[in-house]
Image (cartoon, rainbow, N blue to C red):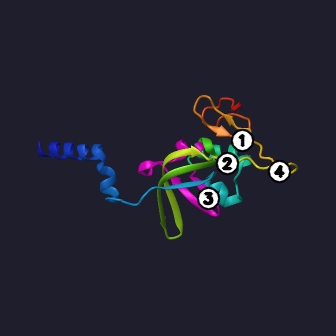
Amino acid sequence: MKKLLALLAVIVFLALGGRSLWAHGDDNTPDQTLTGEVVCVSCYLAHDGEGEEHAKCAKKCFAKGMPIGLKVGDKLYLAAGEGHESANKMLGAYAGLQVSVTGHVMEKDGMSMVEVETIVPADITSPKDSATGNVDHKTYFCSMDGYTSDKPGKCPKCGMDLTEKK
């Protein structure tokens, strides 16, 4: 009976969020928002695999369980999901695209990691037309989930065609 009660106590403790407290204690570090490109860590390190032209390869790597990262300027962050779960399902559809993620940032011994809590496609201003100096304001959006892009195409989240905003 005592063993059963002890097991029940552990289950309740874990169900109430005790797992994260047990593993790491109280963490009062504020979350940070980082904006960068979603990359396959392996491809990026091995052969500079990045950009929209590398997105198809990166998505194949993510499906195989390869690590996902966020390249912010010259810095590469390993991306993890909440509770140190894999971030591949959360970020995989954004391979080669710019996103803003909010979460807990950890750094140690030259390594950087972000534990992603929220993801928003980055709001990137369209480049200026070199001939006229005017900014191209065309924006495309997904009517299903609100994804926006400065280029026509398909939504990386659901595969629907993007619609031009008027």
> Rounded to the nearest whole Å, what is the CA distance between mark 3 and mark 1?
20 Å
Numbered badge on residue 72:
3
- Residue 43 pos. (x, y %): 66, 55
Q: Is residue 28 above or below residue 38?
A: below
Evaluate whether residue 44 shows in this view. yes
At 62% across and 29% down in the image, what residue appears?
143
Discs 2/3, front: 2
Numbered badge on residue 150:
1
Q: Which residue is mark 2?
A: 124
From the viewer's perspective, tell me whether residue 39 is left or right of residue 109: right
Q: What is the three-letter code of the residue carrying label 3? A: Val
Disc 4: CA contacts within 10 A as few (<14), some (14-19) or many (>=20): few
Q: What is the three-letter code of the residue carrying label 4? A: Gly
Disc 3: CA contacts within 10 A as few (<14), some (14-19) or many (>=20): some
Whether the residues at callouts 3 and 4 have beta carbons within 8 Å, the answer is: no
Q: What is the three-letter code of the residue carrying label 1? A: Asp
At 77% across and 43% down in the image, what residue appears?
136
- Residue 137 pos. (x, y %): 74, 41
| Lower position in the chain sequence, tag 3 or tag 4 | 3
Image quadrant in which you'd find residue 88: top right
Q: What is the three-letter code of the residue carrying label 2? A: Ile
| Lower position in the chain sequence, tag 3 or tag 1 | 3
| Lower position in the chain sequence, tag 1 or tag 4 | 4
Range shown magenta = 66-92
Q: Is residue 140 above or below residue 76?
A: above
Whether the residues at callouts 1 and 2 have beta carbons within 8 Å, the answer is: yes
| Lower position in the chain sequence, tag 2 or tag 4 | 2
Q: Which residue is mark 4?
A: 133
Whether the residues at callouts 1 and 4 have beta carbons within 8 Å, the answer is: no
Q: Secondary structure at mark 2?
A: loop
